[in-house]
């Protein structure tokens, strides 16, 4: 199979098909296109044909030469590439799918991790820094915890999809597969978001509808574009650095597990947590429940049993 050049036209056509025909999110399509671009460029630079052997060599390359990528990451990238190549075959742009027959890297589901109460207090603490960035970052962290949103859901959040009342709020989330859900929240994040909306107006042009935006200069000097996935990751990274936590211990998906676990500890049924998390099955939701106080209270030999044993 000869080499193939992935172009912007291919990316545009695939994104339209992925969003319009399959009903999936734009951010997911962009991720698939990015991985396809990286693979096809790598294969072309190496002068390798588009075959199963080349895909398997790329998988080894990701592990050995690209920061020791985990099996879970490589499995995700193979899945994305396989979908793009299948689309290219269906369009007659490739004679065969080079991913066919490539084994998916095996990986085990790790136990969910959550932030401790002390860590959450430190993350949400008011540092006293009177800047727009400090205000925005604190609002982002609190909203992540209050709603359990995925990173791409937060980056795509617009003003028309958040509602703030006196003490409560609701956010209309468009998740994986363009599935919609509404998540309620309350607490100090509500007045914090109201303050952020006032400050945000100083940096954003009227035609920008992203809730959280990059802050550099003012709205007349290029500031105000929507804050993307990397920007959101950096918000938590800065907070973790301020707390002295190692980088590997601070990641946004950990906040999502914290949200699920704290709801479970509060007595919310797992079925309701599944809906709030945007999961298709409760099996997936259970993977997000870390070792919790509710588990610890139940998973122990009761005092009555010790009495029966005469102890």
Image (tube, grey):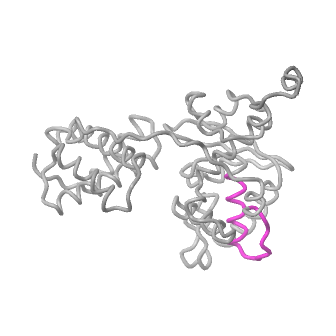
Q: Nearer the viewer, residue 242 or 97?
A: 242
Compared across the picture, whether 43 is left or right of 237 comes to left
**Residue in view at x 36 percent, y 48 percent:** 74
Q: Magenta includes 131?
A: yes
Picture residue at 52% right of the left edge, 58% below the top: 229
Q: Quadrant of the N terminus?
A: top left
Stretch in magenta: 124-144
Q: Main secondary structure of the magenta part?
A: helix
Q: Nearer the viewer, residue 202 or 231?
A: 231
Q: Residue furthest left?
A: 2
Coordinates of residue 113 in the picture (x, y in percent): 62, 48
Residue farthest to the top, as pictured: 308
Image quadrant where residue 295 sits: top right
Q: Is residue 210 magenta?
A: no
Q: Is residue 63 above or below residue 231?
A: above
**Residue 46 as seen in the image, left or right of residue 77:** left
Please tell me whether residue 142 is drawn above or below residue 225 in the rendered image. above
Residue 31, x across and y down, in percent: 40, 51
- Kindly identify the residue that appears in the image at 58 percent across and 42 percent down: 111
Q: Is 27 displayed left or right of 227 in the figure?
A: left
Residue 44 occupies quadrant: bottom left
Q: Position of residue 273 (x, y in %)?
A: 68, 33
**Residue drawn at point x = 56 percent, y = 79 percent:** 221
Q: Report how many numbered discs are placed on residues in the image.
A: 0
């Amino acid at each position: 199979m000869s080499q193939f050049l992935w172009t912007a036209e291919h990316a545009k056509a695939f994104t339209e098909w992925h969003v319009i025909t399959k009903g999936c999110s734009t951010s997911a399509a962009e991720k698939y296109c990015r991985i396809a671009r990286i693979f096809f460029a790598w294969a072309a630079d190496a002068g390798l044909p588009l075959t199963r052997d080349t895909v398997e060599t790329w998988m080894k390359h990701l592990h050995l030469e690209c920061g020791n990528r985990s099996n879970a990451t490589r499995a995700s990238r193979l899945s994305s590439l396989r979908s793009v190549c299948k689309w290219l075959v269906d369009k007659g742009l490739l004679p065969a799918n080079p991913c066919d027959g490539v084994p998916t890297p095996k990986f085990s589901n790790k136990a969910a991790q959550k932030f401790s109460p002390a860590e959450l207090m430190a993350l949400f603490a008011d540092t006293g820094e009177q800047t727009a960035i400090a205000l925005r970052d604190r609002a982002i962290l609190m909203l992540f915890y209050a709603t359990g949103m995925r990173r791409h859901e937060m980056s795509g959040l617009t003003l028309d999809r958040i509602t703030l009342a006196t003490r409560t709020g609701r956010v209309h989330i468009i998740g994986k597969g363009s599935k919609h859900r509404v998540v309620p929240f309350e607490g100090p994040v509500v007045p914090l978001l109201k303050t952020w909306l006032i400050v945000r107006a100083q940096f954003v042009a009227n035609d920008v509808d992203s809730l959280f935006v990059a802050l550099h200069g003012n709205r007349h000097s290029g500031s105000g574009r929507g804050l993307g996935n990397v920007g959101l990751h950096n918000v938590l990274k800065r907070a973790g650095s301020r707390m002295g936590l190692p980088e590997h211990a601070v990641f946004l998906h950990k906040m999502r597990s914290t949200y699920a676990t704290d709801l479970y500890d509060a007595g919310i049924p797992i079925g309701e947590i599944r809906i709030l998390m945007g999961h298709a099955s409760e099996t997936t939701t259970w993977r997000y429940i870390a070792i919790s106080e509710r588990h610890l209270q139940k998973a122990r030999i009761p005092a009555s049993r010790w009495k029966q044993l005469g102890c």
